Amino acid sequence: DAKTTQPNSMESNEEEPVHLPCNHSTISGTDYIHWYRQLPSQGPEYVIHGLTSNVNNRMASLAIAEDRKSSTLILHRATLRDAAVYYCILVPTDKLIFGTGTRLQVFP
Amino acid sequence: KAGVTQTPRYLIKTRGQQVTLSCSPISGHRSVSWYQQTPGQGLQFLFEYFSETQRNKGNFPGRFSGRQFSNSRSEMNVSTLELGDSALYLCATRDSPNEKLFFGSGTQLSVL
């Protein structure tokens, strides 16, 4: 099963950029890299996704390594509302494996 | 468009009972996937249905089953409940396998 590896936790101060890494060394050529985040007491919500090129949207940026074996979610200016668990997954795969994600703490 | 709707929101059952959870997808979404979330375990994939057919299945015992109806609504069933089945059960829908997932708020199941 295609799997991703993320650090358990990260910390940031408000207004600072945050770089959340994800390793996916077994990625296949057709897998998209998706990022989701889960706020307390809510279901996960979509953040961003990409295939090969870097992607930007109003929430974040996604930087994908040239060999596609790793990626980084970039929050340009962290806010307290960004405190959540961030999941990186590969889509499509036979099984959607979310793992335990990275818990991001943001300090004022 | 209405979001993904999961019912009920909370459920309390006792060991040995069975339970059925429901997920209504966003209009037009044909794929429904189910997940179990327990503290410290993250999101664990149960199964995915696409156009009424089970597309993939996670590593859960046969007590966990699901189905999808022609209107894309999905149900999951857990029989012979165990204490360890206490968890938040989430469903997610999408309109095709490559697209982004939209999650419901989940059903919090407590087994006593």
Image (tube, coloured by chain):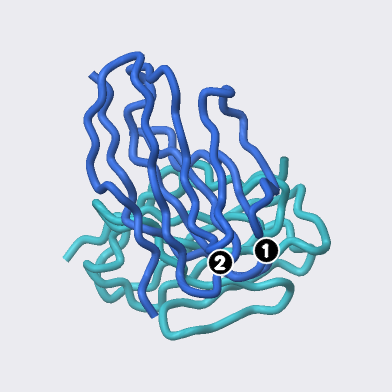
The colour applied to the residues of chain A in this rendering is cyan
Q: Which mark is residue A84?
A: none
A70 is higher (above) or lower (below) than B36? below
> Which residue is labeled 1 in the image?
B97
The residue lying at 40 percent from left, 48 percent from top is B90
- Residue density around tag 2, few if under 14, some if 14–19, many if 20 or more, within 10 Å: many
Residue B37 appears left or right of B54? left
Q: Position of residue A27 (x, y in %)?
A: 76, 54
B110 is higher (above) or lower (below) than B82? below
Q: Residue furthest front?
A: B70
**Residue kind at label 2, given as amino acid type:** Arg
Q: Position of residue B6 (x, y in %)?
A: 35, 54
A69 is higher (above) or lower (below) than A72? above
Task: Report the front residue among B46 and A17.
Answer: B46
**Chain seen in blue:** B
The residue lying at 54 percent from left, 56 percent from top is B32
Q: Quadrant of the N terminus of chain A?
A: top right
Q: Position of residue A43 (x, y in %)?
A: 35, 56
Confirm or deny contact between disc 2 and disc 1 (CB under 8 A): yes
A68 is higher (above) or lower (below) than A60? above
Task: Report the front residue among B48 and A18.
Answer: B48
Q: Position of residue B105 (x, y in %)?
A: 32, 56
Q: Chain of mark 2?
A: B
Residue B111 appears left or right of B66? left
The residue lying at 71 percent from left, 52 percent from top is A93
> Which residue is labeled 2 in the image?
B94
Q: Chain of mark 1?
A: B
Disc 1 secondary structure class: loop
